[in-house]
Amino acid sequence: MSVSKTKLTRLSKEPTEKEIQNSILAYLNKLHGCKAWTNNTVGIYDAKRGIFRKNRSPYTSKGSSDIIGIFKGYVLCLEVKSKKGKLTFEQKAFLEEMAQLGALCGVVRSLDQAVKLMTLFEAHIHDSCTQDDTIRIVSS
């Protein structure tokens, strides 16, 4: 039985942002006190025209995080990036705005980073126990 060259090449590459995102979502939704979901801000595909139509709703937030959720009563916003992925201006602005409003925010590049970040958030929530406290964790 032989393995195709394409499969060998794919196995040696870094995980995609989508793969990282899926592993983080699986972890978060098993975590006690957490519910998380993807935030799809991509336009709607128009099969007739063969293009994505932009979402023109005034209630769509450009740059909103890949993962949105609730963790122990706090809003959770995580932007998922690959090893070399970079935040856009809009993504950074969204995370900063949400952090100022009291959300738990961060940029994660792996499941391990997400686990460490959630442990940090848990400690912060346990130590502060006030809704007035804000944790600002936004990295590039």
Image (tube, rainbow, N blue to C red):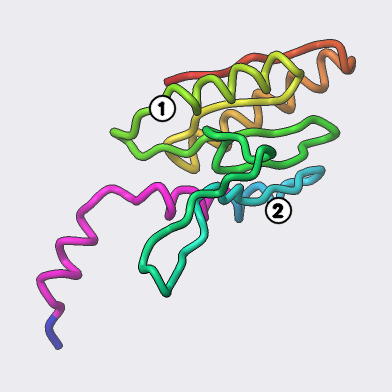
Give the left or right position of residue 47, taking residue 126 as reference.
left
Residue most toward the bottom?
Answer: 1
Query: Looking at numbered disc 1 in the image, what kind of residue is underneath it?
Result: Thr
The quadrant in which the C terminus is found is top left
Q: Could you say which quadrant of the image residue 65 lies in?
A: top right
Residue drawn at the location 16% of the way across and 66% of the way down? 8
Q: Which residues are magenta?
A: 3-24
Residue pointed to by mark 1: 88
Residue drawn at the location 70% of the way across and 52% of the way down? 29
Counting from the top left corner in percent of width and height, residue 19 is at 43, 55
Viewer-nearest residue: 114 or 137 = 137
Q: Earlier in the sequence, mark 2 or mark 1?
A: 2
Task: Give the secondary structure at mark 1.
Answer: loop
Residue most toward the right?
Answer: 130
The quadrant in which the N terminus is found is bottom left
Residue drawn at the location 58% of the way across and 25% of the way down? 94
Q: Vertical placement of 124 versus 78: above or below?
A: above
Give the left or right position of residue 22, taking residue 74 as reference.
left
